[in-house]
């Protein structure tokens, strides 16, 4: 596994240290799942999507177990100064997984077509989006 | 009465009482402030709803309800610049919905921020900017400049704006009635744009479909890039500009707007039918690229 892949698959820092004694008042996953609409044509789709979905489910399950207190959310989005609720934090995490999945797919596509300026532009944009979402957490 | 039934009834009554109690603890809002017709208004709410509607008075009328956890509703500034913030105590863990409904002069400039709040804006004519994380954004405005963003929510903009910028990560993005410049971007959501006299359109997605229905100006610059989504362009005619369509593993559909293009004639792995380009006299260009999706250009 290369360095990028390793970085992408690395668990969310600090997640394992969160106390698991306080469950949210409702299951967060259905709300997240409703937002995760599979697209019909990903070049390396089904297995990859299943992996991403299980990653998202894992993250959601962790957040269902417990979360720490709310914090402010520095970052590029205009919502930066507002605190993220448990649900919103889980949704941002799920979207971060979507972005990371997209980044992996773009890197694979670039292996087939390394000179594509479009893929490079999309990758740059996706990496930027990943930074923005990470900054929200 | 058996024990499980008693337990269920007790829990039901307790939950009912708790929910009625929460409703009781919601505090109604009814605030008024003078506002200039061209004031700047900033409003933020973590969870619930922000709804802004234009009316014909130079005044803000704010109604709605504050949730139990809200520490205070802070309204600061003056008639030229007003800021409305829902303040939560530090380290708040769960946030119930707070509803903010604003009536404002149509000419104001608006900035609305939420986290899990839906944002709806109607009738504003000044510049409008709306951002939220997991809520939907719906703008039906007369603004010249519009920006709307969400992380997981859908973003819908109906505005004759000269500049429209919309983005979401996993939500769908829809723009109607735009003029001039449109920039739309998602990661997995679809992007659908209907524009008039479009001069500069830039659409991007990783796996979402990109759809543009437009009357393109003679010097239009259109660029659509996606990795695995389809790209669809509907136009009355293509302007006389450079046209460049390309897909790596998808297909380009035949079209009366692409004279001489026969599409894919072989089913094996050649590149035929996956590129189309022609030069034009105009200064603009139309560039539609998908890595594994299809490209369709059709006459409307």
Image (tube, helix red, strand yellow):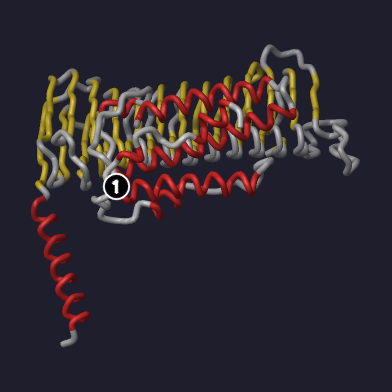
Q: Tell me the quarter of the picture where residue B74 sits.
A: top left
Determine whether the residue tagged by mark 1 lies in a helix, strand or loop: loop
Q: Position of residue A12 (x, y in %)?
A: 41, 35
Using residue B146 as the reference point, say whether residue A127 is left or right of it: right
Using residue A11 as the reference point, say whether residue B280 is left or right of it: right
Residue at position x 42%, y 26% from top?
A: A132
Residue at position x 47%, y 28% from top?
A: A130
- Chain that bears disc 1: A
Residue at position x 41%, y 30% from top?
A: A133
* Count of labels in the image: 1
Residue situated in front as seen by the camera: B189 or A6: A6
Q: Tell me the quarter of the picture where residue B147 sits.
A: top left
Residue at the outermost bottom position:
B1
* Quarter occupied by the C terminus of chain B: top right
| Residue position for label 1 | A66
Q: Can the viewer see residue A84 in this picture? A: yes
Q: Position of residue B79 (x, y in %)?
A: 14, 21
Q: Position of residue B292 (x, y in %)?
A: 71, 37
Residue situated in front as seen by the camera: B181 or A15: A15
Using residue B134 as the reference point, say whether residue B208 is left or right of it: right
Relative to A23, residue B242 above or below: above
Residue situated in front as seen by the camera: B67 or B99: B67
Crowdedness near tag 1: few (<14), some (14–19) or many (≥20) residues, C-alpha within 10 Å: some
Residue at position x 50%, y 29% from top?
A: B178
Residue situated in front as seen by the camera: A29 or B150: A29
């Amino acid at each position: 596994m290369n360095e990028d892949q390793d970085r992408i698959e690395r668990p969310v820092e600090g997640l394992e240290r969160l106390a698991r004694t306080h469950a949210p008042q409702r299951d967060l996953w259905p709300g997240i799942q409703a937002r995760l609409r599979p697209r019909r044509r990903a070049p390396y789709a089904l297995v990859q999507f299943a992996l991403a979905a299980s990653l998202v489910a894992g993250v959601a399950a962790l957040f269902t177990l417990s979360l720490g207190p709310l914090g402010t959310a520095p970052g590029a989005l205009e919502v930066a100064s507002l605190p993220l609720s448990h649900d919103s934090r889980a949704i941002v995490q799920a979207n971060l997984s979507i972005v990371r999945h997209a980044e992996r797919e773009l890197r694979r596509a670039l292996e087939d077509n390394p000179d594509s300026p479009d893929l490079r532009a999309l990758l740059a944009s996706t990496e930027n989006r990943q930074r923005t979402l990470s900054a929200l957490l | 009465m058996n024990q499980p039934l008693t337990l269920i009834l007790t829990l039901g009554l307790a939950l009912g009482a708790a929910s009625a109690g929460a409703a009781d603890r919601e505090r109604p809002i009814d605030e008024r402030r003078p506002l200039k017709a061209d004031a700047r208004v900033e409003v933020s709410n973590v969870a619930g709803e922000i709804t802004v509607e234009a009316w014909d008075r130079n005044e803000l009328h704010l109604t709605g309800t504050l949730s139990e956890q809200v520490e205070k509703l802070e309204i600061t500034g003056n008639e030229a610049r007003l800021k409305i913030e829902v303040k939560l105590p530090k380290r708040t863990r769960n946030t119930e919905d707070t509803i903010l409904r604003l009536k404002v002069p149509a000419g104001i400039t608006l900035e609305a921020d939420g986290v899990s709040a839906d944002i709806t804006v109607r009738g504003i004519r000044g510049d409008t900017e709306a951002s939220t994380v997991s809520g939907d954004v719906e703008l039906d405005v007369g603004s010249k400049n519009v920006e709307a963003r969400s992380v997981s929510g859908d973003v819908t903009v109906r505005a004759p704006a000269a500049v429209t910028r919309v983005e979401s990560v996993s939500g769908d993005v829809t723009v109607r009635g735009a003029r001039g410049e449109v920039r739309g971007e998602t990661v997995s959501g679809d992007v659908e744009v209907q524009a008039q006299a479009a001069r500069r359109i830039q659409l991007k997605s990783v796996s979402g479909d990109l759809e543009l229905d437009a009357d393109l100006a003679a010097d239009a610059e259109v660029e659509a890039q996606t990795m695995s989504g389809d790209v669809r362009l509907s136009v009355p005619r293509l302007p006389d500009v450079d046209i460049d369509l390309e897909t790596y593993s998808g297909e380009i559909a035949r079209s009366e707007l692409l004279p001489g293009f026969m599409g894919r004639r072989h089913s094996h792995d050649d590149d035929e039918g996956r590129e189309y380009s022609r030069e034009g006299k105009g200064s603009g260009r139309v560039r539609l690229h998908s890595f594994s999706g299809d490209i369709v250009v059709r006459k409307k």
